[in-house]
Amino acid sequence: MTTTLITGANKGLGRETARRLLAAGHTVYIGSRDPERGRATAAELGARHVVIDVTDEESVAAAARTIEADGGLDVLVNNAGIEGRTEGNGIVAPADETVDTLRPLFETNVFGTLRVTHAFLPLLHRSAAPVIVNVSSGLASMALVTDPAAPAHGYPGIAYPASKTAVNMLTVQYAKAFPRLRVNSVEPGFTRTDLNGNQGTQTVEEGAEIIVRMAQVAPDGPTGGFFDAAGPVGW
Ligand SMILES: NC(=O)c1ccc[n+]([C@@H]2O[C@H](COP(=O)([O-])OP(=O)(O)OC[C@H]3O[C@@H](n4cnc5c(N)ncnc54)[C@H](OP(=O)(O)O)[C@@H]3O)[C@@H](O)[C@H]2O)c1
């Protein structure tokens, strides 16, 4: 039996990933910072739930203790993330980007991913087939953001792409440090969720495809890579 924790799984891509991994036979923990939203989603899907705010050290430690006491963890999906749009749903322009606008993105997307990974690594090391999936973005890709032919080139903001590029560095460094683990970054593609005011062009079913696939990567499958549904993504 494979046990999987998905952070930020009460809605969006995390929820759809949970639905699909449950169907594939995983025992899934819906990670949610809000207890009620997590409980409701878990009840709808037939999953377990655990409160986890990735920006809160004690919340993450408590979630790790709970899952350890229940029997451990095989797959960690670091999915919780924010894009940090303005109230009008606009992207902060480079001229308006400050340390204060950047900080929340790094707190959640980068420090959150590192905090959760650090807390759950001891559990993953005890798994027979440990896996980490870091939900990154095409906007993390220096190759795409600097390619005038790529849609990512047109994204004006600094904070979100910079945070996801940092997530990709976590992926490659963890992958090298822990060769027994499969650690990969994934790019779901532009997907209709609350993150982007539901402006994405893909459904959550399409967006979750590569997250679900890499959560089920075989022990001899790739590690330290960056993938979308079509294959490897340039760094
Ligand atoms: N949608 C896209 O086009 C797209 C493209 C590329 C990558 N991604 C990435 O995909 C991941 C999922 O995003 P989504 O599109 O599904 O967005 P979403 O529907 O807004 O879901 C984001 C999830 O993260 C949770 N979250 C935010 N801050 C958190 C915190 N501090 N602790 C725990 N959970 C937290 C949210 O919880 P609440 O409900 O409590 O806010 C929610 O469950 C993100 O990492 C995002 O960057 C999305």
Image: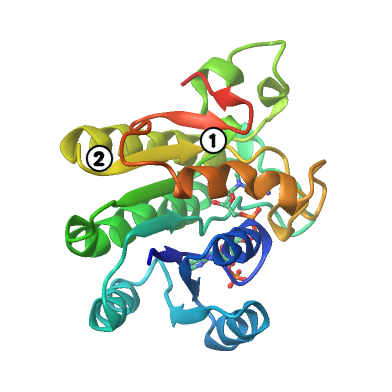
Above or below: residue 89 compared with residue 142: below
- Where is residue 188 drawn, in percent x and y? 62, 41
Disc 2 crowd rating (10 Å Cα; few below 14, some 14-19, many 20+) is many
Q: Where is residue 177 in the image (x, y as percent from the top left)?
A: 17, 37
In primary-sequence order, the first of circles 2 and 1 is 1
Callout 1: CB less than 8 Å from ligand 1: no
Q: Is residue 203 left or right of residue 184?
A: right
Q: What element carries label 1?
A: helix
What residue did someone put label 2 on?
174
Residue at image coords 82%, 41%? 201
Which residue in the structure is indicated by mark 1?
Answer: 161
Q: What element carries label 2?
A: helix
> Label 2 CB, ligand 1: below 8 Å?
no
The residue sitting at 31% across, 32% down in the picture is: 172
Q: Quadrant of ligand 1?
A: bottom right
Instruction: Classify residue 179 as left or right of residue 12.
Output: left
Q: Which residue is drawn at 45% across and 57% down?
A: 108
Q: Which amino acid does label 2 sit on?
A: Tyr
107 lies above or below 151:
below
Q: Is residue 142 visible?
A: yes
Q: Position of residue 223 (x, y in %)?
A: 34, 33
- Badge 1 density bin: few <14, some 14–19, many ≥20, Cα 10 Å: many
